[in-house]
Amino acid sequence: MSAPARRRLAPDPAEAAREALDRAALERAWSNPAGFVGWLTSANHKSVAIRMIVTAFGFFALGSALAAVMRLQLARPENHLVGPDLYNQIFTMHGSTMMFLFAVPVMEAFGIYLVPLMIGTRNVAFPRMNNFGYWIYLAGGLMVWTAFVLNIGPDAGWFAYVPLSGPAYSPGKRVDLWAQLITFTEIAALVAAVEIVVTTLKMRCPGMSLNRMPLFVWAMLVTAFMVIFAMPAIMVASTMLAMDRMVDTHFFNPAEGGDALLWQHLFWFFGHPEVYIIFIPATGFVSTLVSTFSRRRIFGYPAMVLALIATGFLGFSLWVHHMFATGLPLLGESFFTAASMMIAIPSGIQVFCWLATLRSGRVVLRAPLLFALGFIALFVLGGLTGIMLAALPLDLQVHDTYFVVAHFHYVLIGGALFPLLGAVLFWLPKLTGRMPSERLGRWSFAVTFIGFNLTFFPMHLLGLGGMPRRVYTYGPGVGLTTGNVVASAGAAVLALGLLLFFANVAWTLRRGAPAGDDPWGAETLEWATTSPPPAYNFAYLPTVDGSAPLWSTRERPVVTGLRTDVREVLITDGIDATPDHRHRLDGASIWPFLTAVAATIGIVTALFTPWGVTIGALLGLITLTGWFWPRGAPEHAIAEEQP
Amino acid sequence: MSATSPVARARALDVSALPTIVYGPRAPLWWGVLGLVAIEGTALAMVGVAYLYLRQNFVAWPPEGTPLPRLGAATAELIVLLASVLPMAAVDRFARAERHRLVVLGLTIGIVFGLASMALRALQFAGALGCRWDSHAYGSVVWTLLGMHAAHVITSTIENALLLAVLLIGPVERKDFVDAHINAFYWYVIVGLWVPTYVLVYLAPRWL
Amino acid sequence: MTRVVVLVIAVISAACSGRMPVLDPAGPQAGRIATYWWVSFWLSVVILTAVLAFLLHAVTRRRVLVTPPASPIEDVRTERRLTLGVSAAVGATALTLVVLLVTSIATGRALHTFGGTQPLTVEVTGHQWWWEVEYWDPVPSQRVRTANEIHIPVGRPVLVKTRSLDVIHSFWVPGLHGKKDNIPGHPSSLVLQADRVGTFGGRCAEFCGVQHAHMQLLVIADPPDAFEAWLQAQRRPAAIPTDPAAHRGFDVFMQGPCALCHTVLGTPAGGRTGPDLTHLGSRTTLAAGTLPNTPGHLAGWIIDPQSEKPGAQMPANSFSADDLSALLAFLGGLQ
Amino acid sequence: MKPLALVLCAALALVACQREQRRFSEVAPSSGRPTHPTSQAGPNPAERNAWATSQGKQLYQAYNCDGCHANGGGGIGPALMDARWRYGSQPDDIYASIVEGRPNGMPAFGGRIPDQQVWQLVAYVRSLSGQPRFDIRPTRSDHMAVKPSEQARRPERPQPASQEPR
């Protein structure tokens, strides 16, 4: 069992044979059951993550289709393509889908795929929870999209401001569906966040102290902490909303001492960190891409880490800049203006460090890097308009106009989607074992970049021209036609660019050249294993002594002595990653799926009657009993003490 | 390229001598429960903030026509919960020593305390608050605070009961003791959360 | 890249040909905000240009077009230079932010101050989906209630009190000032002033339901004496029409559906659900800026409001042709 | 799996569309004034639609019904949230009460309130005593109102009350 690592070069045939034996044993221990049931039960972080990424991009396609319909509707004044009722459902679904069903899940999915590989371990800390999280996420998405298809889509905006979203002004089940969507997606997001925190803190390979962690892992760690402290606010708020709507509580009823602003405080206490929850993983992508393709480690690693942490903290202190127009006390507004502007400093540090890395490295201009460079340009522009919005006086003018729409699409598409697309191209060889087309990659970047700017730059001017958000039409002759026409035309170009991108992905899957372990010459541990990685990730867990393990020329020992016949991983100390104990992970199981089904039944029933909560809890009790009931694993019995 | 290059057998890091069962912050599950606690604590804190925020909208607190919440059942529950820390601390300790019978005994006592707490909570819902959840915003927020915390008491008691069943029916595994000690940890948090909840719901109206 | 620049310039020039009320201020409040806009705009242009130039320079220099070389590069002297550079850039960022912060706070304070003149107080209530406007006066009978159009005197500050009884709306007249939300349970206010005669478009800026798009208003700045004359005229109740057609319209109005929701001062009609129609004829638009106020549009609106403004609270009505023309005669007379 | 999902969706669609549809653009003629109530065949469509019932609730205020009937508790007019129905509890009966008026003060609103809105009012009036299905009935208002809300009320079994006024 304790053979030294022989990955590519194995001069000693005896050791090569031993490694082959170990791999065969690991394969048996870590592989999932085959077939449909295996698909439901998977406890492999990679297959769950890929599923989640594919699902998230599916919802992205749906959300984009809605965006296309909105651009068609707004392509000319007083258009009658969709009426106001449908339009309101469309923009609500667009926002909710993109935020809750695409951006957050896809970032966490990348974290779940990459973090165990990057820190050199075999799986995430709670593999069954991981599977549960995926099914809950899928159920939430399917529920709300089914409702939308049935013309019961939520229609009060992704922010669902009360009293508009309350019982008196949103009758029917539309907003209830939105509130339950929140329940679903927040459970999924929180599960993934805890997963990532514990995996990162307890499962890093020996030697990977916190100050040697890849920046992407740092980014995911900060993100996961932000999720843990931000999402409860929206869960509480949406639960209050659901109770106001269903069991007559008065949280938001001004006539009975409730308060409409309470909703806004709770919502934005989540809503603003949410933006950073999407953006921080993207900075992790960019750091990885910039470092790899500059052929040097990222400049200013400690500053980058501190900037991430500072962003994480500051992100919680500026929610009120979404509420400047509500008329809060002046002093408070000045504080929140200052805090909102201050967050530009950590963002600035990151941008400057990337520029310094590019400037001092030897740039290899490959397609994934192009997306990262596009990100820098767009994000700086979006950041600058963000600083404008942080200023109370200017915010009073452009708040809730297309200027804001332009701003947040620059920071969310420019700041998160571009790095994400770059990341997809970059890690596609690892995920699939095949190289994407460089040429298609470059074309898709160019078309997407141009299309994006054509679509969203004019929106700045539309906002200054007085066009508010969330209107289904506008009058002719008020100076809004040109900008809207250009934006709609740009949307077509943007759609073409995205289609090219996904065509590239499809081409890669069918025709891509074999990638090899490390086609980009990257530095982090996921490139030290095969592409795609085996179920157990590494035959022997690596150890590291620096921050760019694959670029180090020093020889490092590998970990031996972990059992290969069961799913055993090495748990290390949280700070300096010294080996602490061996831990057995749970294997594949149907119960997480059944628990997700039980929860779904409960949550959906709760749309109609409060008894749904009880029903869901009872069903959940049954499935959780099945989940945790021991099934006589002899190697854990007291009698059989391990050495 | 160290991780991909051949290494001498002597330089391999052999971890086979490391333990497989550990307790406390060394165990990943402990951290997982800590994450859960952070989430639930934040959620409860948010409702607490909402309570204080809604206070501003009222002249009197509780609002006129609503009596002050009665202290009896809640204070009794506070005592029960604080006392329940003792058996659960025993579970914690005996679990680390893998003392099967004593853990079973401690859990049983813990469950009895949990049931007592639930009964006392039911009494509070039945009348101690002096209003319904749909009376006014005050009613909504105090019912929610109590309800959220009650959900935790119920969850944790059920968890203890399940674990007790596992320990009684078997086959008992060593990791069940890790679970037992983590249940104790979770129970401490629930007792800890009852203190600010109690203060907000029952004492704060007397001061605010 | 050039293509992009050319396109962007084309877009900007195309869009700038339209009117941009935010950048075309007509009063001191909007003026101060526009000044702040230009400060931050030019600073942003400088920063963006600098970053993009540096980025282009960085990636075009020392480029490797082949597959990655094996050994990455880093050397101590370069690192020190980079540290200096990055620190300087961060320092400059902080400095810029301080400048912006101070300017922003100063601008914000200035927005709350106004000259010694006694402001005119107007209470604006947002409804789904129209604006109720009340000119405040210590004598209740002197108060004036109208809808969707606010006349103000040039050169005098106007205290706009915002409130709402249903959902959240936001009062926004970009040529004069920024927004202020109308939130149920949270009355608020802002002070604006017009420095020139003119008509300024405004609208609801907070999503408020199905017809948020058609919740507009007009602010009409008149010379002070013209304003006083207008206000006096608005105080007069409507006269019972003597003209037979209009009188028949009056009957239709009072006995038909209209009076259930609308008020006409001086008549039995006292509904408060819809806009006050006492001086409907003096207004320029119908249905909160949805239609111009012409007899044809008014007729269409009365018969079938839902095709122009689907979801509006006004129901469809059926009148005989005679009744309708009589009603229009009556409504046209409400000057 | 798939056919089952399809069937489920179809069933949902049937149930859902009816209770959720929002029909703004019905160019409904005003209710006939002096004629018989256009008592339609079958039950009131508004009563199977949560949005329409909620519109009825808004109209109940807009048309000042609460001026006499209060929030269902009665005042000048009779209570609407109890089980006593002087002129019948069926939608058609309530329609007739609104359109034709009733002795002792209930005015005739025929010709003043469009038909569609009358039916919405009928649905709401019946929901005051818990008649329509529970997930159609509105929940709490955004103003001071009788508790519990219409949805939380236990449905009353309507009993025709004696004809003489109370």
Image: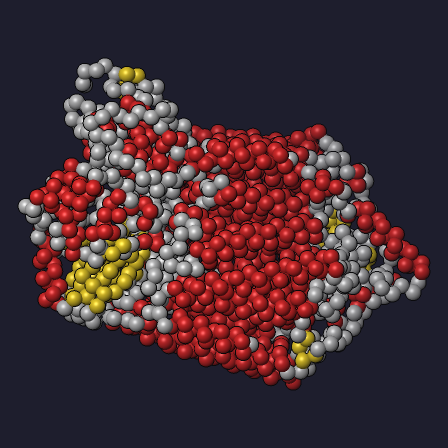
Q: Which residue lies furthest to the left in this view?
A: C242
Q: In this view, does B139 lie above or below A269?
A: above
Image-based side of B157 in relation to A70, left or right: right
Image coordinates for residue A561, horizontal then vertical, percent? 82, 54
Residue shown at the point (35%, 54%) measured from the top left: C213
Image-based side of A92 in relation to C105, left or right: right
Where residue A362 sits, quadrant-wise, is bottom right
How does the figure colour the protein chain or chains? secondary structure
Image coordinates for residue B88, horizontal then vertical, percent? 59, 38
Residue shown at the point (34%, 52%) measured from the top left: C212
Q: Which residue lies furthest to the front in this view?
A: C321
Residue shown at the point (57%, 33%) measured from the top left: D7
Image coordinates for residue D2, horizontal then vertical, percent? 63, 37
Q: Tell me if I can see residue C97 in this picture.
A: no
The mark total stands at 0
Q: In this view, does C215 lie above or below D125?
A: below
Q: In this view, does C208 lie above or below D153?
A: below
Image-based side of D56 in relation to C90, left or right: left
Q: In this view, does A513 lie above or below B134?
A: below
Decide which of A85, C162 is in the foreground and name it: A85
Residue shown at the point (79%, 69%) measured from the top left: B1
